[in-house]
Image (cartoon, rainbow, N blue to C red):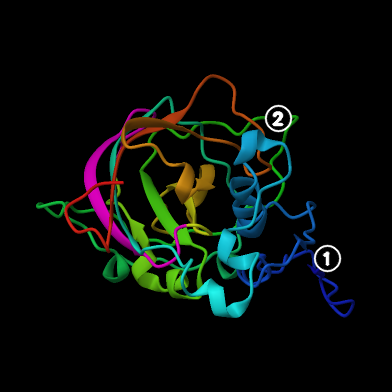
Amino acid sequence: AAASFRSGKRVGSTNLDPLPTWRCGGQMAALNYQAHDRAVWINQGKFAANGGCGWVLKPPRLLCGASAAAALAPAPLLLRVSVLSGHDLPPPEPGLIERSLMRSTSRSSRRSLFASEGSGGGGRPDSPGSPNRCKPPARKSAVDPFVVIEVTGAAADAADTCSARTQTVSGGGENPEWGETFEFEVAEPDVAVLLFTVWDDDVLSADDFMGQYALPVRCLRRGVRCVPLRRADGTPHEGAPCLLVRVESESQKQEGKAI
């Protein structure tokens, strides 16, 4: 069994990216759960499959020889995700963030199918640390939420074209409405993970983390769905904060036929 580990020379708490290990058929990517960052979120999303039991079967192409792997390669997937609204969003958690640990997502990198372009503050997501579980953060009088969506997995799915950012809803508070649709071309859907993160847009300081959720692309169900939001450490929020989204997908090798 193959496994990857952090270098012994690394003295920080940041995690390695588990995706290259999974792409080459590695059995395990060792992560530091002291750091609640993007790598841990993606790992939790990856192993949400199979009932969250902790074991996920490799794609068939990673279980055979190189000669047969090409024939078993999955068809690229055209994925459309509409972020409709947020409901009972949790309060922002200031001070959890370092910009360098999250893949940057600019407005120019997103592929929005939404007709009108609203105004809103800019900002990029940051990676969180441990939330203060003893004293919940106070809710600001005005929260300006936006959502970042990432599709990650294969090397081709790590480009900026597989990340998107909604407009900021100024003063959107707990129940914002977006109504924006994004399109992603997923090169290898059998290893891809879809990550949602919600942020409070701050003009004069770093954007504040609000919630996250990740799940395998192959586990997506079409139609209008609720995406539950979790804290940075993966635990559920009080209440039931969620995003309302619509999911559509179709195979690139079978044009016009949804899968």
The structure residue drawn at horizontal position 71% and vertical position 38%, both measured from the top left corner, is 132
User: Over which residues does the magenta segment extend?
Assistant: 169-189
| Residue 180 within the magenta-colored segment of the rendering | yes
The structure residue drawn at horizontal position 73% and vertical position 33%, both measured from the top left corner, is 133
Q: Residue furthest right?
A: 8
- Determine the secondary structure under disc 2: loop
Q: Earlier in the sequence, mark 1 or mark 2?
A: 1
Distance CA(mark 1)–CA(mark 2): 43 Å
Marks 1 and 2: which is nearer the front? 1
Q: Tell me where residue 135 appears, x and y as whole percent.
A: 70, 30
Give neighbour class at mark 2: few <14, some 14-19, many 20+ (Cα, 10 Å): few
Q: Tell me where residue 196 appears, x and y as whole percent.
A: 46, 47
Q: Tell me the number on the disc at residue 1.
A: 1
Q: Tell me the number on the disc at residue 135.
A: 2
Please state which amino acid type lies under the numbered disc 2. Lys
Q: Can residue 197 be seen here? A: no
From this view, report whether residue 68 is shown above or below residue 80. below
Q: Tell me where residue 105 appears, x and y as whole percent.
A: 40, 66
Instruction: Locate the N terminus and report the quarter of the image it occupies.
Output: bottom right
